[in-house]
Image (spheres, rainbow, N blue to C red):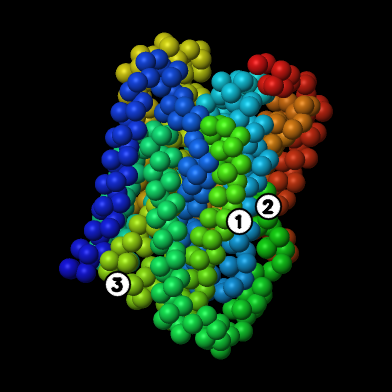
Amino acid sequence: MSANITTIVPVIGYLALSFAVALWARKKSEGRVSSQGFIEDYFIGGRSMGGFVLAMTIIASYTSASSFVGGPGVAYRLGLSWVLLAMIQVPTTFLTLGILGKRFAIMARKTESVTITDYLRARYKSDAVVILCSVALILFFMAAMLAQFIGGARLFQTVTGYPYIVGLMLFGVSVVLYTAVGGFRAVVLTDAIQGIVMVVAVVVILLAVIKAGGGMEKCISSLKAIDPGLITPTGPKDAVPQPFTLSFWVLVGIGILGLPQTTQRCMAYKDSKAMHNAMVIGTLLIGFMILCAHLAGTLGRAVLPDLPAGDLAMPSLIVELLSPVWAGVFIAGPLAAIMSTVDSMLLLVSAAIIKDLYIHYRLKGDASRMTLGGLKKASLISTVVIGMMVFVAAIEPPDLLVWINLFAFGGLEAVFLCPIVLGLYWERANATGAVASILCGTGSFIALTIMKPAMGGVHAIVPTILVAILIFVAGSYIGHATVPAKQHS
């Protein structure tokens, strides 16, 4: 038990620091005297992020349980092929800020948009687009948050020996509380801390694995002896075919432009210098973290070849190779990734409920009709209720969280990719095209995921995005043109 307590101390310290940051952020926002001022501060931090914080919050909101637990667990089974696949995520920050960054920020400021849905409402002037996007965001985010809650609790259980429910309560309640209390400012500041913790954690476990394996060269030789397929680009028995690898360029490469939790950050940075600095810092750090985490999973097979594959592989490596204190530090790394993903999603779900649906439709878009105290209370309550719903769903967890997470990612991309990107860059884009694209894209993705037709190893997201684009273009030519938001400054 003493080892368990030693392991838990770094985790408790990290959670306490996160909550202290939330209280500071809450106090900072108390200077806002209007409802609109509070909304901007609570949901986008008053558009004040610098380069380092911007980079870290994009990385932290994108990386998740699948990056530290699920993905390395698959890499343990499939070898270097999955490391190659995972590295497709390296351009995440560069693509998000390079393609959406400046243009999206300008449009958001001109239209006074605080959320993604605010921008889509201003761009398409359609209630159908707003409602469909808000509902999809809530549903797919809840699925994604479920994967994060499960991943964090399983990791805690395996490393510390405490029951699953204890881990679920410890970090689940913590992340819901600090997000509800501190809002966006607390989220981005804790994201920056979480990013640093993640870097330390992946370096520690990778060095421990390489040392235990007798060096990199010996680890690779051991993998080859176990199964030569572990060191090939397609994996054992061609488990990762080339079409599947190419599909991932859509799912976790181009497709990330449709993830609201990362695109939301494009509204909140301070200036162009901050954006450019974030592009460089973010690209370097996310590549480094993903490489270390997945390489540790792969090389861990050479050190401990008989571990259970799947979500428990990485936690088992931690238990076997690290001292209790360093195990606690490593737990803090994945928990940081998980919490930073969940807090971003919680905040956006809360924004969808309070800002996009309640204020716009119930209060006719006039936030001043709510008192500042009432708005703060409603934002806090909605965040807590959604978080607790996911918490309850995670009590009886399904397996394979990496696939749950990828399903949620694919669903979000099917809904948001075309309306956001084509809405920014194509003047002809209109509500008819957006609605048709959302419905057909989401329907295609769910149908292909459930029926699993033979597609030669191609992931369901590829035909989904093709269908969504074609339907969007066709619908936009059929429907009436919408005046682009940029003409309304």
Instruction: Inspect the image, locate mark 2, and give the three-letter code of the amino acid beneath it.
Output: Val
- Label 2, secondary structure: give it: helix
341 to the left or right of 271: left
Residue topped by disc 3: 323
Q: Residue at x 71, y 67 (%)?
A: 242
The disc, 1 or 3, on the residue closer to the chain's N-terminal end is 1
Question: Which amino acid type is shown beneath numbered disc 3?
Answer: Ser
Q: Return the x and y of residue 285 as percentages of the image width and height.
A: 53, 55
Residue under label 2, please give it: 250
Q: Can residue 257 be seen at all in this image of the molecule?
A: no
Q: Is residue 444 above or below residue 264?
A: below
Label 1–label 3 contact, CB within 8 A: no
Nearest to the observer: residue 92 or residue 339: 92
The structure residue drawn at horizontal position 46% and vertical position 21%, both measured from the top left corner, is 358
Where residue 318 is drawn, which disc sits there? none
Q: Residue at x 25, y 60 (%)?
A: 8
Residue 24: percent from left, percent from top: 31, 34
Pick the residue in front: 309 or 342: 342
Q: Which mark is residue 90?
A: 1
Q: Is residue 369 above or below residue 219?
A: above
Q: In x, y percent, where is residue 115? A: 53, 29
Is 168 situated left or right of 61 in this image?
Answer: left
